[in-house]
Amino acid sequence: MSFHITALTDPEATASSRRLAWLASGDDGVPLGSAFLRLFTKEGQEHLAELELAVHGAERRQGIGTRLLEAAVDAAKEQRRRSVIAQAAQGSPADLFLAARGFRQVLALTHARLPLADLDRIALDALVELPHPGYLLTEWEGTVPPALARSFADSRRAMDDMPMDGTDFGTVVWDVERVVAAAEAIARRGELLHTVAVVDAADGSVVGFTELVVPGDGLGDGQHYGTAVLPEHRGRGLARWMKAAAVRHARERHPGLAGLCTDTADGNASMRAINDALGYVPTHKAVEYQLDL
């Protein structure tokens, strides 16, 4: 089969990355597959690229994916990247494809879903209302309030020691500009960002947070983003407290929402235990792969 690879450029760079793209098409111009290579541009991740590659199911095993991969890897090398990461559902064609082409498995993830119709409201209320002396819950939709922006950005370092096994993910350096840009990007997609945070009552600073993104129409499933607590405030049940509050808010604010989805590294035993306690049900496994350049 004859096909062509066309290099493209995504014109919409974000505050922390930009993307290159390639389109595979047949002689008749019909798209057969695509590859996107995200180049991280912020300090701490300038060595890293992230690959998304897809080939139409009917067009596989004809060399299209291999050619797209070669184009993306060559570009990553030209951009002086050290690592390319990619994710695939365990046992999927993408999983087998990456494993056969020099990528190595560096992280296992469990995806889980909480069906909101099955919530035990009494138990959930009890978790949210459980006293946590010295701490207060606060929450907001969209961009962080200016009064909390600085300490919220500082609290993002709570993610720095998240279990990543062998992944060469680098360190995400957060500042107020990046926090605001991330919230604005979600809003531009037409989605709703809800954040629950724990504040140290002694000084009013944010010491932990959990983020939930909901479709703009409030239907379907929401997706949990990060949940983390600063190391010096761990062991007090704050992560479970925040996540329970986020679940209750989602149920009350979006009555048409069907469920909440999350993914957790298999090595993150504490967060997996929180998900289990809240009633999340595992749905499938995913594998994070890495190619060392």
Image (tube, rainbow, N blue to C red):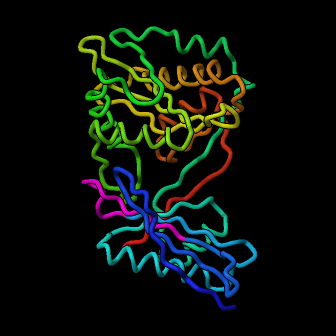
Q: Magenta segment, which residues?
A: 35-48
Residue at far bottom of view: 2
Image location of residue 112, percent across then percent down: 63, 41
Q: Is residue 119 left or right of residue 147?
A: right
Residue 114 lies in the magenta-colored region:
no
Residue 46 lies in the magenta-colored region:
yes
Image location of residue 65, percent across then percent down: 59, 78
Q: Is residue 146 left or right of residue 257?
A: left
Q: Name the residue located 57 percent from the left edge and 20 percent from the top edge.
A: 249
Q: Is residue 256 left or right of residue 105?
A: right
Image location of residue 281, percent across then percent down: 67, 37
- Does residue 145 sit above or below 160 in this rendering? above
- Does residue 31 sit above or below 271 in this rendering? below
Q: Name the residue located 65 percent from the left edge and 22 percent from the top edge.
A: 251
Front position in the image: 110 or 68: 68
Q: Is residue 268 left or right of residue 230?
A: right
Quadrant of residue 48 within the rendered picture: bottom left
Front position in the image: 175 or 88: 175
Q: Name the residue located 23 percent from the left edge and 14 percent from the top edge.
A: 203
Looking at the rendering, in which quadrant would you find the C terminus?
bottom left
Q: Name the residue located 45 percent from the left edge and 20 percent from the top edge.
A: 139
Image location of residue 241, percent across then percent down: 48, 20
Front position in the image: 196 or 276: 196
